Image (cartoon, rainbow, N blue to C red):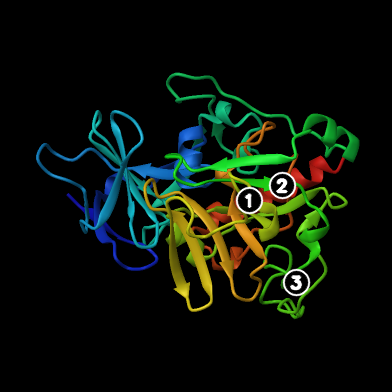
Amino acid sequence: MATSILKISCACGQINGILDVPTSSLPLSIDFCHCSTCRHVTGQLCLSSFSTPAPPEGSSALNVTDQTVAYKTSDHLTRYFCGRCGASIYNHDSTTRNDHVASGVVDKTEGILTFKQHTFIGDTKDGGLSSWLEGLSWAGQPDQGEEMRFKTNPTPDKGAREAANPSEMLNCHCHCGGVQFRITRPNPSSCNLSAPVPDVLVPHHSQFPQNLPSSAWWFRANGTRYLAGTCACNSCRLSSGYDIQAWAFVPKANIRQMNGHELDYEMGTLKRYSHSKKAYREFCRTCGATVFWHNDERPGLVDVSVGLLDAEDGARAEGWLEWATERVSFEECAQNKSLVSSLSRGLRSWGERKAF
């Protein structure tokens, strides 16, 4: 039987492996799970993975180095991630004996993986990322729930936003609870910093002097919300394990520990991975959730992984965030170009509909 070999790796290179799948089974289907567990255990808006064909008894289609960290999310599902850089590698279902491989850790995707469906979007309240990426959308499991579609509502004015979201604190946490913090509303101190314009607003390959400090671009809606966007760069993909990383740009002064103290990158179960001399990522060392990204060029501004947010209005936290819809950051560098291109088109369409 003809087979295809997929190589698996993470950002730091500690985890390596191969996946041997029958060529006749290609392309494998990517499912996006939007359940609350998957969002908080990954830090992402959803978990994107594909299932390996069940191997013969006593064998395995997936073989990876044994330095992974295991975290049990349910009685039958165990998550495996890299303990050095935090990348999700795969989930193992002991009931079905299937491995669900994170879509961002394989070395090739075109002709190998294809997006199929969204599951458990009922948990999101607002549709989450499913509103931007067209596909089958299920309230729960495909064989247990019903298809769902969320209506795209126009952006509310400031008064309507404040009435719907009166809270001045937004709680955030990973699945195991080892990392917990709060985001506060923008205030005068939120402007006391400078930061280069990000790629999600201005492509780095353009002629715009994007590396120069600019005005407070991270503020939106007359200073009542923070900018959020999606990223498809290889660094985010290999560090998270997923093709699409969602970040909120929040001043460090507006991120507080649960006891009210200022943000400490060593709080709780945070662990740091430095993928360059001046850029840093934090993740939960227990459950593996992606938490922060920041660098020395703009120490006062922090990228917060949006899947950790517990907003009353839904997974996209639109009472707190305004989403960049003109592009996906570093979409030109995306490995799964067809998937990210579809996301980019969906974001623009969604943004246009919300404008009316």
Q: Is residue 249 above or below residue 167?
A: below
* Amino acid at pointer 2: Thr
Task: State which mark lies toward you, 3 or 1.
Answer: 1
- Let me know if residue 335 appears in the view: no
Residue under numbered circle 3: 194
Sequence-first tag of 1 and 2: 2
Give the number of the disc on residue 256.
1
Sequence-first tag of 3 and 2: 2
Q: Nearer the viewer, residue 275 or 282?
A: 282
At label 2, counting other C-alpha atoms closer than 10 Å, the crowd grade (few under 14, some 14-19, many 20 or more) is some
Q: Nearer the viewer, residue 1 or 61?
A: 61
Percent position of residue 91, x then y: 32, 42
The answer to which quarter of the image holds residue 17 is bottom left
Helix, strand or loop for disc 1: strand
Q: Nearer the viewer, residue 31 or 225?
A: 225
Residue shown at 64%/28% (left/top)?
A: 149
Marks 1 and 2 close (CB-CB < 8 Å): yes
Q: Is residue 82 above or below residue 114?
A: below
Sequence-first tag of 3 and 1: 3
Percent position of residue 124, x then y: 59, 32
Q: Is residue 132 left or right of residue 227?
A: left
Q: In this view, does 299 lie above or below 336?
A: below
Q: In this view, does 15 lie to the left or right of 336?
A: left
Give the number of the disc on residue 184.
2
At label 1, counting other C-alpha atoms closer than 10 Å, the crowd grade (few under 14, some 14-19, many 20 or more) is some
* Amino acid at pointer 3: Ser
